[in-house]
Amino acid sequence: VQLQASGGGLVQAGGSLRLSCAASGQSFSSTTMGWFRQAPGKEREFVAAISWNGVNTYYADSVKGRFTISRDNAKNMVYLQMNSLNPEDTAVYYCAAGRRIWSSRDMRLARLYDYWGQGTQVTVSS
């Protein structure tokens, strides 16, 4: 699976962005997909994840209620709708795919994902 993230940019606090992740490969529809982010000087952190069939979604507490993850298996796409953005959301956002991730606990662990996109920069100005 190869991943290509896009949709980042500069937005004012309170604004919205939608990130997209295009996947190639026949196994996409059977993989768990996640979004992670990394701010300067900080470790990569979990943002959101979605199960292979889109039924189950999970969010970091810091984005719950503001971000929505979704997927379209017919198009090999994953999305992250980000609303009510604040400067603390500034980071490089990465999409990732995991072939053997099923539990909600494991979906939050970056080390369990097999494939990563190149990242897209999100900058939120105050």
Image (cartoon, rainbow, N blue to C red):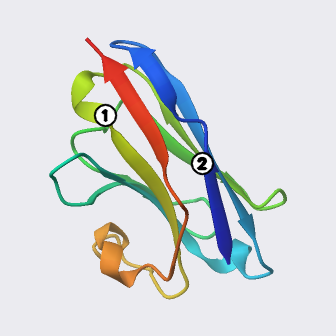
Q: In which image quadrant can residue 20 be found?
A: top right
Q: Residue at x 33, y 13 (%)?
A: 13
Residue 51, numbered circle: none
Query: Which part of the image, by quadrant, shows the N terminus?
Result: bottom right
What element does badge 1 sit on? loop
On the image, the x and y values in percent for residue 104 come to 34, 70
Q: Does the rendering let one see residue 50?
A: no
- Residue 31 falls in which quadrant of the image? bottom right
The disc placed on residue 90 is: 1
From the image, which quarter does the C terminus lie in? top left
Towards the viewer: 98 or 119: 119
Q: Is residue 55 left or right of residue 87?
A: right
Outermost residue to the bottom: 100
Which residue bears the numbered disc 2?
70
Quick one: SS at disc 2? Answer: strand
Q: How many marks?
A: 2
Is 52 left, or right, of 84 in this rendering? right
The mark closer to the camera, 1 or 2, is 1
Q: Which of 39 and 101 is in front in this view?
A: 39
Q: In this view, does 118 lie to the left or right of 101?
A: right
Residue 78 visible in the picture: yes
Name the residue type under label 1. Answer: Thr
Residue 87 x, y percent position in the rendering = 25, 24
Q: Nearer the viewer, residue 38 or 82?
A: 38
Q: Tell me which residue sits at (45%, 40%) in the image.
A: 121
Image position of 14 with respect to 117: above or below: above
**The residue positioned farthest toward the front in the image shown:** 41
Q: Residue extending furthest left?
A: 41
Could you tell me which residue is drawn at 29 percent across and 73 percent down? 109
Residue most toward the right?
A: 74
Gap in angstroms between the C-alphas marked 1 and 2: 21 Å
* Amino acid type at image mark 2: Ser
